[in-house]
Amino acid sequence: MSPIAVIDFETTGLSPALGDRATEVAIVLVEGGRVVDRFQSLMNAGVRIPSFITQLTGITNAMLADAPDAAQVMADASRFVGDTPMVAHNASFDRKFWVAELQRLGLPAPQPYACTLLVSRRLYPQAPNHKLGSLVDFHRLPRAGAAHRALADAEMAAALLGQIQRDLRARHGVAKPDHALLMTLQRCAKPTVSALMAKYATACTG
């Protein structure tokens, strides 16, 4: 299957529309079920990190003082991804920062995003919840470093993506659980998932 870029951001808050900026980005490139490359960097966007974010992530203002400029990091990240389709856990969050940071540089952000959170809600309704760490534990996947650091979370999201693809093959008979199928599946109402699996191209909304 074609490569997929799994991304995670750490940020100063929830929304770039409110002035929040990215402080760290990590991208794990997955191909054929294997991690084939990685990109990770802190980034200095010239804004201060609130104390509660430092408590959550461990990223401090002192760490960002020595970090490369956000514009350079995002330009490098854009070149690393190219046109590769992207995946994130809670992708609506990561996508809005990807788009906002690249817009500051006048760079396009055309990559389609699939969401392992939405797909997991449809495939694993029996999971205790659908937070990334909970799903990693539910599937007994390895934890990769400290949570709420970009590379560790991107690695765990990549492992979850691999689990999803394996389950689509083994449990649902999907020969090619590619990015396009994930995007269709995340839009499905839960009762139509089985029908979609039977007919890969079933159109559904929800």
Image (cartoon, grey):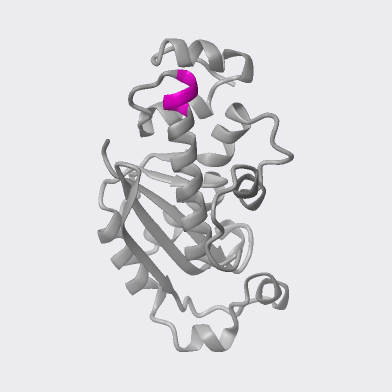
Q: Main secondary structure of the magenta part?
A: helix
Q: Quadrant of the C terminus?
A: top right
Can residue 88 be seen from the camera position used here?
Answer: yes
Residue 184, visible in the rendered structure? no
For the magenta stretch, what is the residue range?
A: 168-172
Q: In percent of the image, x 65 and y 43: which residue is there?
A: 138
Q: Number of labelled discs?
A: 0
Residue 165 x, y percent position in the rendering: 43, 34
Along the viewing direction, whichever of 35 and 9 lies nearer the viewer: 35
The image quadrant where one finds the N terminus is top left
Where residue 73 appears, as percent x and y from the top left, is 36, 71
Q: Identify the image quadrant of residue 39.
A: bottom left
Residue 73, compared with residue 155, is above or below; it is below
Q: Position of residue 156 (x, y in %)?
A: 51, 54
In the figure, residue 118 lies in which quadrant? top right
Observer-nearest residue: 162 or 201? 162
